[in-house]
Image: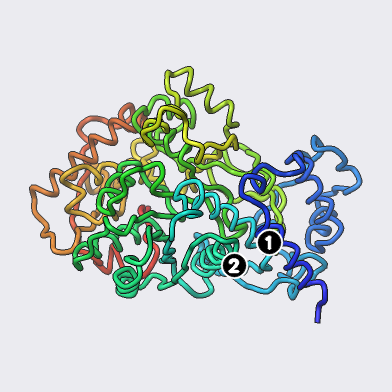
Amino acid sequence: MDERKPQRAIEALRQFLETPLDRLLGGSSGADPAAQALSLFREMAARVPAYGRFLAEQGIDPASIREPDDFARLPLTDKANYLLRHPLADLCRDGRLESCDMMAVSSGSTGKPTFWPRFVSDELGTAARFEQAFHDSFAADRRRTLAVVCFALGTWVGGLFTTACCRHLAAKGYPIMVVAPGNNKTEIWRVVRELAPQFEQTVLLGYPPFLKDVIDGGIAEGIDWRPFGVKLVMAGEVFSEEWRDLVGERAGIAEPAFGSVALYGTADAGVLGNETPLSITIRRHLGQDPEAARALFGESRLPTLVQYDPRARYFETRDGTLLFSGSNGVPLLRYHIADKGGIVPYDAMLRFLAERGFDPVAALARERGTATPPGRGLRSLPFVYVFGRSNFTVSYFGANIYPENVTVGLEQPPIAGWVTGKFVLQAVEGLDQAPHLAIAVELAPGIAAEDAKRDAIAQSILAQLLRLNSEFQAYTPPEYRLPRVTLKPTGDPDWFPVGVKHRYTRK
């Protein structure tokens, strides 16, 4: 028996359960995030065997890292140079795997499983992100809420982790009931039909394309979502604001900024940041102003934009990619996850927008129908934006073509009613045929492939590529711009197999 574990769990749970969200996010001590990251370094150097060996291999004397400025001299860690080179136990504090109590699995882009141990106290940092979403966006502290976990259950990180965090909110006093049908649509619909009428709102938590399938399939099954006060919590994929509008309309979500929340999370460290009503308002504005978005983010696609608590996760950037440090079952320091993105301080974000004539606080108040800014959803936390990994783009005449650009073309009326939103993008530049963008598009159930639909889809995608992607407009000769679209039936086994995570590009 480890007598320290119950005390560790009790102390962590007490702090989370007894600390109001405002204090949890504000930080009662006002500690400097950089100093906290330095403190994590000292703990890891002293207690994590793998990190001690890593520093020795890199020629770093821990005693030489004394000030926050010294922190930037520490070498980056990643899966290849750190995680995969050491036994799993040595990545934990004191080399004790049994100090954790739960194992999660991620497959990553290679498909090879990676194991992530954690203890109940490691869940609470992520639970705070869920609390921020449920409190600030959904007012779940005062509304009876059914939380329906639609992530896959089992060893994979999403489902059980999400279920645990929602239960922590219920234990804190939120009037939340958690039910976890997983990614079984028939069971989700049964749960919604029988339980949702007993609550004021229903929150569906899952992977965005799957939640769209749940909502669209539910309508086909005769479910009217509007009386259930549907809200969405999503993770795992960047989506457009047109997608948010489309799915929100079908689900009966009246206030886009307060009706859904995207999480920026990883199996490595839980949820790193979350959308807020303010970040959504800003992103929606930038979606209508591609030039301002390009000036801010440096690319012609719209990233996920979230706010984060710098005391919980310490972000840095290196060459246009994100690094983070944070305490977990496997603590990570200056961890390079290969996500393209950047950081924007709160004041810098508001100043950038003000210089271009946009006040997101006033816009948020207008959405709520108030003359004064709403109290919820306004927190002076920094922003982090993330595009995801660049290997999901294709290069065409030297222009980077992003799946996000194509997605917007499929979300225009009436096309959105014909398709599921899934597609596969390829750049074909072989010697035996003319160069072209090949796009296989999955049709919605019951929709037949027709030449008129195919041509309308191709034209819609082209229009959005020209609007959103300046490289495509500048580099691609006009005669090679129109995509060649092929229409595939729902669940086509070669292009859209059921039950696996979809990939939007092929090389």
Q: Is residue 227 left or right of residue 312?
A: left
Kindly check if marks 1 and 2 are in contact, taking CB atoms under 8 A apart as contact.
Answer: yes
Relative to the observer, which residue lies in front, 235 or 193?
193
Percent x, y of residue 95: 80, 69
Q: Residue furthest bottom?
A: 1
**For residue 412, above or below residue 95:** above
The amino acid type, in three-letter code, at marker 1 is Leu
- The quadrant of the image that shows the N terminus is bottom right
Q: Is residue 60 left or right of residue 129?
A: right
At x 41% / y 44%, what residue is drawn?
A: 258
**For residue 274, above or below residue 49:** above
Q: CA distance from mark 1 to mark 2?
A: 9 Å
Relative to the observer, which residue lies in front, 480 or 504?
504
At x 80% / y 62%, what residue is drawn?
A: 48
The amino acid type, in three-letter code, at marker 2 is Thr
**For residue 359, above or below residue 377:** above
**Which residue is denoted by mark 1 in the rendering?**
83
Q: Is residue 429 visible?
A: no
Percent x, y of residue 426: 31, 50
Q: Secondary structure at mark 2?
A: strand
Q: Which mark is residue 493?
A: none
